[in-house]
Every structure is written in structure tokens, then in C-alpha cells.
Amino acid sequence: MQTKLHKIEIDNPNVELYIKREDLIHPLISGNKYRKLKYNLLQAKTENKTTLLTFGGAFSNHILAVASAGFENNFKTIGIVRGEELFDKIDQNPTLKKAQELGMQFKFVSREEFRNKTTKAFLHNLKTEFGDFYLLPEGGTNELAIKGCEEILTKEDEVFTHICCSIGTGGTISGIINSSLNSQQIVGFPSLKGDFISNEITNFVVKSNWNVISEYHFGGYGKITDSLIRFINDFNVQHDIPLDPIYTGKMMFGIDDLLKKDYFPKGSKILAIHTGGLQGIQGMNEMLKKQNKEIIHINEI
């Protein structure tokens, strides 16, 4: 399992910034998805399950990671996908197309149905349709996922004063908080609008050495702006590190802006976690092309 620590040169002699390349762990089960699935796969095997079932949207990192993990570990995989209109558009969607090639079976449901995905009635109907399965929640966050994410930080990372992490469902940052030193400050950057995520994190952690900065979601999940695209492209040119536009790109934009505002005290040593998600760039670029906008230029993924 390969990760890499990369120093980012910044125009601030009083602060150091590093990025941890969790995206290098696996080409498809990338970053935090690898961490979240690790103990869930072991549990599924312990329970003698042969099928993994999970939920996601059109360009879900989690959907593709589960498909890949199932392929590599001899599980059947089922993806419950938000959006009935995607049924006959799989070949036009790089995420779903690759997941299907890896053996994932899809069930496309309306957005209204998808909101009921955690109800007993919905899950009962799925078991009637597909038989017994090991359930993975949307985004992959559960207790076992958090256990896996607690392994992101290592002994070598104890030198950092601040750990920065993007936030989706809250599982990754919860694991980081649990394994951090009390002296370290954990800073989260949500990709979704709303203040609910702090409550989600509180359910999984007991420490108080963390805070959430909600000013860098760019309009909400999956929303982007021209300035974000320019930042991601410039960052790649300067540092030879691709960023995804949903999570890590927004976090790094936020860190860059906070550095300019002297948010981090003198002497800070910051570690930013690259949680992967690069596979989603291809789908995002298809959308940008249709809007005649600048696309994200990426390295070999």
C-alpha cells in the first residue's frame, strides 16, 4: 500500500504545508474509500456474505470503489443508483461503465425513492429482490469505516500541528480525529452545504480538537466554479499533483485562502489529506465540455 508525503511550497516562511497522497493507495479503491472498505470487507467475509450492496450517485467514488473491491475479493456487487434517467446512459458515464465492467449490477431509482434508502421497508424490498447481502451505506461511513480511517495518521504524522481533511459523510475526518493527538487541531472542509455535518461527526468522536470551516463548498456537493477549476489546474502545474473538484480540490482552495488570511498561527505545520476521488474528473469534464468551460487537466490516473 503506497502513500506519499509531499511538501507544498508556499509564500509563507512561518508555516509549512504538506499533502499526504492517500490517492496513490489504489487506482480505483482510492484514498479514503480503501480505508473505509478494509474492515467492512473482513466483516463481510466473517459473516460469510457473498454480495455487497451499496448506494451512490452518477459519478460516485464509493460505487466504483465497491465494484473494484468486490471484483478483487470475489464478492458480487449491487449498486443502487440515484436517478432513473441513468438506466440507458451507462456507456456515457465513465464511473458506471467501469463499475459495470467490474461486475456490478445496478438498480436505478428515482431521487424520491433514494431518500428512503435507510428505511426498513426499502431495505426489506431490496432483500426480497436480491437475496442476502452485506450492506454498505452511501459514502461507506459506519463504525468499521471509521476504524479504517483511524489508520490514515501514522506515528510520523505526530509532528504536524494541523490536519486538514475534506468532508463528505464525515467518516474520514472522524477516524482522523479519533487517532489524532490532543495537541493537534483537525480542520474539516465540507463539500456539502448545511451545518448538519458537525452533528454527524459528534456521533463518532469524543475529542474536541476539531472544527469545521464551511465557506468552501462552492455552492454544495458537485458544484464548482471557474475559479475552482483554475485553482486545480494551476496547482497541478505547480506541484504535479492532481486534485478532484468535489473534495480535495475544494479543501486545498480553502487552505490556500486561509494561508493568505493568516488563519494558521506562526510555526504551524499543516498536513492536508488527499482522499482520492480522481476518477470522477472524467465525468466532470464531460459536463464542463457541454457548458463550453475550461476542463480539469489531469495526470495519468
Image (cartoon, rainbow, N blue to C red):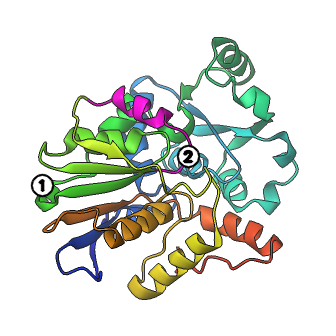
Kindly identify the amino acid type of the residue bearing the numbered disc 2. Leu
If the image is split into quadrants, where does the N terminus sit?
A: bottom left
Task: Give the crowd class for mark 2: few <14, some 14-19, many >=20 residues within 10 Å.
Answer: many
The residue carrying mark 1 is 155
Q: Residue at x 85, y 45 (%)?
A: 87
Q: Quadrant of residue 193?
A: top right
Residue 244: numbered disc = none
Q: Residue at x 40, y 39 (%)?
A: 171
Task: Indicate left or right for 169 with 193 as reference.
Answer: left
Q: Quadrant of residue 92?
A: bottom right
Q: Nearer the viewer, residue 242 or 217?
A: 217
Task: Indicate left or right for 114 with 87 as reference.
Answer: left
Compare marks 1 and 2 and give the one earlier in the sequence. Answer: 1
Which residue is most to the bottom? 237
Residue 30 drawn at (x, y percent): 46, 58
Q: Nearer the viewer, residue 220 or 277?
A: 220
Q: Residue at x 46, y 25 (%)?
A: 48
**In the picture shown, does residue 123 fall above or below 36?**
above
Kindly identify the amino acid type of the residue bearing the numbered disc 1. Lys
Residue 32 drawn at (x, y percent): 41, 51
* Kind of element beneath mark 2: loop
Q: Is residue 199 magenta?
A: yes
Does residue 254 show up?
A: yes
**In the picture shown, does residue 53 fall above or below 47?**
below
Q: Nearer the viewer, residue 207 or 87?
A: 207
Give the Cα distance between marks 1 and 2: 31 Å
Task: Give the crowd class for mark 1: few <14, some 14-19, many >=20 residues within 10 Å.
Answer: few
* Kind of element beneath mark 1: helix
The residue carrying mark 2 is 192
**In the picture shown, does residue 195 fall above or below 135?**
below
**Magenta-tinted stretch:** 190-205
